[in-house]
Image (spheres, coloured by chain):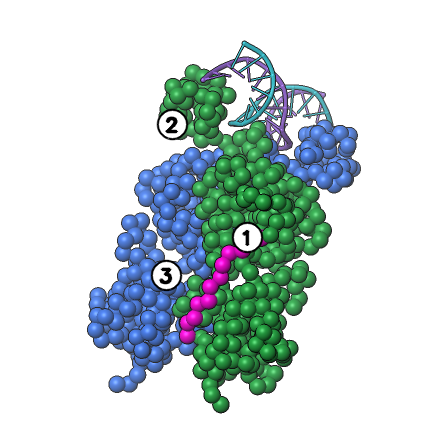
Chain colours: A blue, B green, C purple, D cyan
Amino acid sequence: MTNIDDVARLAGVSTATVSRALRGLPTVSAATRRRVLAAAEQLQYAVSPNASRLAGGRTATVAVVVPRITRWFFGTVVEAVEDTLHESGYDLLLYNLDGRERTRQRVLRTANLHKRVDAVMLVATPLRPAELTELAALGLPGVTISSGSRVPGWPCVRIDDVAAGGTATRHLLDLGHRRIAHICGDPHDELAHTTHLDRRRGYQEALRAAGIVPDPGLDVESQFTIDGGNRATTELLARGEPPTAIFAACDEMAMGAVRALREAGLRVPQDVSVIGIDDHDLAGVLGLSTIAQPAAEQGRLAAQILLNPLGGRELSPQAGRIPDPGDDPGAAPVILPTRLVVRESTAPPRAH
Amino acid sequence: MTNIDDVARLAGVSTATVSRALRGLPTVSAATRRRVLAAAEQLQYAVSPNASRLAGGRTATVAVVVPRITRWFFGTVVEAVEDTLHESGYDLLLYNLDGRERTRQRVLRTANLHKRVDAVMLVATPLRPAELTELAALGLPGVTISSGSRVPGWPCVRIDDVAAGGTATRHLLDLGHRRIAHICGDPHDELAHTTHLDRRRGYQEALRAAGIVPDPGLDVESQFTIDGGNRATTELLARGEPPTAIFAACDEMAMGAVRALREAGLRVPQDVSVIGIDDHDLAGVLGLSTIAQPAAEQGRLAAQILLNPLGGRELSPQAGRIPDPGDDPGAAPVILPTRLVVRESTAPPRAH
DNA sequence: CTGAAAGCGCTTACAG
DNA sequence: CTGAAAGCGCTTACAG
């Protein structure tokens, strides 16, 4: 395996010069650079990332933590992040929590991040207080996406979940619905995941603004999955007179709701309207009305914020800051817009 | 940042002994090991991966290459692979091709894999002859999943695509269908992706076995996506009398087909039956009949095959072999079983 | 079972 | 603009 000495010998320069020429540092004459590049090319030389990182003190790697890579939002975010990072020469170390305590520890414990990555991206990952302390103590730059814990000094990219919940609910109100149910959230989430709380708040505020008192009997908690939506809807129907519309906290739950309604012999939207949040890949196929959120853009923007401070080639301990003027740690999150997409799953309630 | 010298000093041993004790090598006395572990714990010591890899010559990292992480099959495979690798202390470097030439080069060129990973996993990735040569020249162990190129000496985990296509088609034949269309494949795929060819072969063989001559007019090529299925079906309907059933090469295409049929005013399954391959997360929601394939199992098994040879802690140049007796490079692929899942999208054709 | 020493392949002040 | 030398933080023969 050819190393830097081989290249230096062939080019007739020192290894220091090879290192500089290959990294494009300005302090190398054009002629020398040409010779070095030619030698490297001829020898098929590839720099050893480990040696480079050890000597240089930078890992050129970012840890990306997601709850479940197979869910639409997280897969889409990771794809955009991966693209942006690789573009700048950074590697992406993927941590898929998948509800396993062991994985949480692997990722979040000092020992594992230590010396291994230059920065951390947390996607919708709520941390326990102790974990948060540990992470902050590392002094790494980082960024968070969507809900979950804020880390002191780390910027955050997200949508306004309260507004999204409000828009979805108002769409149903505008169609004439009054009995609007909400399915959402994970009741057993010890980790204070705030997404479902925010979206519910948007729902309740929209109802109140329309003069409707939110009915707890029309509000069912479950999980952010197809199955969760299915179960919540089944439970809802078991409680008595069905609502004329359901606002599901995400498209995957909405899909489960559609399924449950159909199995109960109710038609969508003739008997019950359904709206979700996301604009999942399959929302179009299913004709699902939804509040579209820009998942890829959130990933891309968060990655850029991470890379920006030092020209996209380096990360310093100060890297975790939004490059805008007026920026400071703990600054307000960067909010990306959402958009109502009306398809076939929502319609006015039947006249009775 | 505390290093191995700090630990050695505190424990009163050499750095060599610290290294051995921490890695659990057997040549350390119990008492010494205890002291070292205590010292490491007390100092919150974490080994530097880069230094360890540079000195040890192993990267403890596997490159995983997928066409698109956001597609169901690939996301599910990666999730299982990640779990298995992390379990054994390996990192996963994700490469998401996403049709971009640049990314192909990043991954596949010697320069990038060189010194960076211990092994490579190719998921349904077809390689050009030159790329194949380059990859083989690296002498790395590896494994392939699903279709795509076989690399000499690398084992392969997959399903039998011909059989899957046959089973899907026979299900439709058994229901009484005779005019069975097929939508599949990417006509512009210069990379000889064989999945669609195999599944089509299963389709054609099943038809012939039933005494039916495959009709090219009922066979439309498109892409392995929802949109592809949508377009292929629209094209199919434009050709004249619709088939009574459609076999789509994957569930995402089948979903697109269902959508296109519905938009054309045709009911599924009353007017046209639809079956896919995969058992996508949403196949149940959509009531889609399909041939289920074990995506997570393929990922898990492939990762285990990669890790197995040296007890899951190391990889050698010989690591890319199936650990079974009778094993040799170029051996037959490990075939995992598929299973017909009948839901609501397939039914007997209407009597005319 | 343990240690001293060399070495992995780079990058970075420092000096010129 | 370029080079000699030290150093990054480990692991691995080698010797005992």
Q: Which mark is residue A256?
A: none
The chain carrying label 2 is B
Amino acid carrying label 1: it is Val
Q: Position of residue B289 (x, y in %)?
A: 45, 71
Amino acid carrying label 2: it is Glu
Q: Does residue B45 lie above or below A152 as drawn?
A: above
Q: Position of residue A113 (x, y in %)?
A: 45, 38
Residue at image point 29% right, 76% down: A244
Task: Name the quadrant containing residue D11.
Answer: top right
Helix, strand or loop for disc 1 = strand
Q: Which mark is residue B334?
A: 1
Magenta residues, as a range? Answer: B333-344
The residue under label 2 is B41
Residue at image point 56% right, 34% down: B58
Tell me, yes or no, if residue B179 can be seen here: yes
Tell me, yes or no, if residue A53 can be seen here: no
Q: Position of residue B180 (x, y in %)?
A: 55, 78
Amino acid carrying label 3: it is Thr
Q: Position of residue A152 (x, y in %)?
A: 38, 43
On whether disc 1 and disc 3 are found on a single subunit, the reply is no
Residue B258 drawn in magenta:
no
The residue under label 3 is A225
The chain carrying label 3 is A
Out of B176 and B275, give the one closest to the viewer: B176
